[in-house]
Image (cartoon, rainbow, N blue to C red):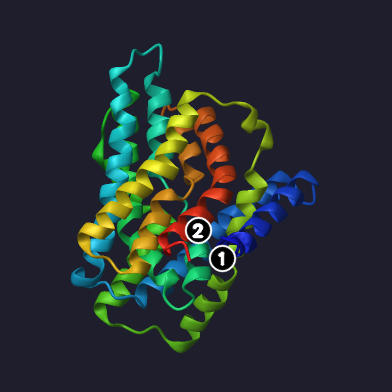
Amino acid sequence: MLATFYIILPLMLLVALGHVAARAGLLAQSDWLGIERFSFKIMIPALLVQAIARSDLSLSTSGPYVLTIILALLGAGLLTLALRVLPAATVDNPQLSSMFQASTRWNGLITLTIADQLYPENGLIMIGIAMAFLVPLINVANISVLSVLNASGFALLPILKNIAANPLILGCAVGLFLNLSGIALPWAIDQALDMTSRGALAVGLICIGAGFDLRRLILLNWKVIWTVGIKFIASPLIAYTLSLLFGLSPMQSLCAVLAVATPAATNGYIVARHMGGDAELYAIILNWQLVLSVPAFPVLIYLMQGGG
């Protein structure tokens, strides 16, 4: 178990560094926002381009793996939406939409880091494959649910525009094009991408730490517990069961479980704020997920590796 803890220790240290640096006021808030935007729009897409361009995207190899994650996230979403049978006074639509987002969104940056620690040769590739398919799908699903629950009306064109402008999706699209076309990037461009992507994981994790707010952990209710339970218990169980049914390799199984158990992405807060969701509830759930992922990830890795 101690060995699995050491796997995520570098991740924890980078998040802690970002939190301490932000609270110490080493950078202005506007500077942190600039770093986060640069990481999101430049560094992480560069990482995805390289990882996906070099991966094996054949359906026979990747199909069952991607389907496992999709079905597990679908199960998580349905478990959340099932709460709609409760009276609105118990859980209203804005709250439910934020719970749906927090149970189905995942911060691929965290999963990329852990997978890279576990499988230095293929970890980034495995998560990159998942992101290539899931980033567009998850965005469509979440924006659609928010549109319906919060009565903002479902409109396909704005959803498609939002997806098309997402830097992560653009990075996935470029990687897919290079992979499927067989086109190789010129050496200089490939090296520039490589240099840019090397710091993506570290910078992204530092930004996550900078945005972490301990004060939100004071706020805990059944909605937070339900959503966190789906993230760390229900979703991994569904993914693990499906991985057995589909005969996934140990690496694919573990990557699938880690993907669905990864804390939600921070962009869900912005989506909730602009589409009538409960943004504060989303932020509270996200902070709890980040804290509980510290013990959850080592336990999941330990169990998935046979407890050895």
Mark 1 touching mark 2, by CB under 8 A?
yes
Indicate the quadrant where residue 23 lies.
top right
Q: Front-most of 250 and 90?
A: 250
Vertical placement of 149 versus 261: above or below? Answer: above
Residue at 26 percent across and 42 percent down: it is 157
User: How many marks can you see?
Assistant: 2
Side (left or right) of 201 relative to 58 = right
Toward the bottom, the furthest residue is 187
Give the residue at mark 1.
Answer: 200
Give the residue at mark 2.
Answer: 109
Indicate the quadrant where residue 90 lies.
top left
Q: CA distance from mark 1 to mark 2?
A: 9 Å
10 Å crowding of disc 2: few (<14), some (14-19), many (20+): many
Specify the amino acid type for callout 1: Ala
Identify the secondary structure beneath mark 2: helix
Q: Dividing the image into 4 quarters, which one contains the N terminus?
A: bottom right
How far from the left and from the top, in percent, is residue 212?
A: 64, 43
10 Å crowding of disc 1: few (<14), some (14-19), many (20+): many
How far from the left and from the top, in percent, is residue 135?
A: 36, 53
Indicate the quadrant where residue 232 lies.
top left
Q: Front-most of 169 and 90?
A: 90
